[in-house]
Image (tube, rainbow, N blue to C red):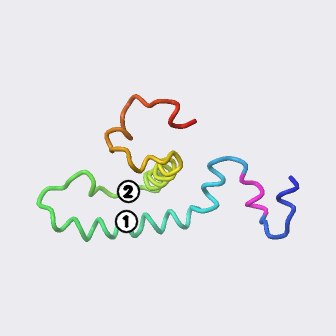
C-alpha cells in the first residue's frame, strides 16, 4: 500500500482494511468502556425518578453501545435524519437506501 507508507500513518491505521477495524480506530475498547461507565452512572441517577423500571433503564453492555454507535453512523451515512423512527426500524428495507 503506497498510501500507508507515509510517516504520519501508524501501523494500526494501515491495517484497518475492514469496516470493523476502521470503526475501532475511533472507538477502541477504552472509549467504549468509558461510554458504558458513564451511561451506567446516568442510568443509576435517572432510575430513582421512576416508580416502575422501564426497559430503557437497564444497564447497557459494551456490545450494545458498540451496536448503537454503529447504527447511528450508518444512519448518518445514508442520510436518514429526516426519516421517522418507524421507517428506520421497519422490517422491510429497500436495498436502494444502502446503495
Residue 9 position by quadrant: bottom right
Q: Which residues are magenta?
A: 11-16
Q: Tell me residue 40's x, y (percent).
A: 35, 65
Q: Assign a secondary structure to mark 1.
A: helix
Q: Which residue is at a point 40% across and 28% down the rendered structure image?
A: 92
Q: Residues within 10 Å of mark 1 (few under 14, many from 20)?
A: some
Residue at mark 2? 60
Q: Residues within 10 Å of mark 2 (few under 14, many from 20)?
A: some
Q: Which residue is at a point 45% across and 66% down the rendered structure image?
A: 35
Q: Which residue is at a point 48% across and 55% down the rendered structure image?
A: 69
Q: Nearer the viewer, residue 24 or 79?
A: 79
Mark 2 vs 1, N-terminal side: 1
Residue 98 position by quadrant: top right
In the drawing, what numbered circle is on residue 39?
1
In this picture, is 64 found above or below 48? above
Q: Assign a secondary structure to mark 2.
A: loop
Amino acid at each position: 500500500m503506497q498510501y500507508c507508507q507515509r510517516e504520519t500513518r501508524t501501523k494500526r491505521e494501515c491495517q484497518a482494511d475492514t469496516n470493523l477495524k476502521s470503526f475501532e480506530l475511533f472507538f477502541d475498547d477504552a472509549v467504549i468502556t468509558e461510554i458504558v461507565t458513564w451511561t451506567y452512572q446516568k442510568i443509576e441517577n435517572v432510575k430513582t425518578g421512576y416508580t416502575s423500571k422501564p426497559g430503557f433503564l437497564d444497564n447497557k453492555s459494551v456490545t450494545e453501545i458498540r451496536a448503537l454507535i454503529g447504527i447511528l453512523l450508518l444512519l448518518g451515512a445514508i442520510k436518514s435524519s429526516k426519516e421517522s423512527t418507524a421507517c428506520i426500524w421497519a422490517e422491510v428495507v429497500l436495498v436502494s437506501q444502502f446503495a
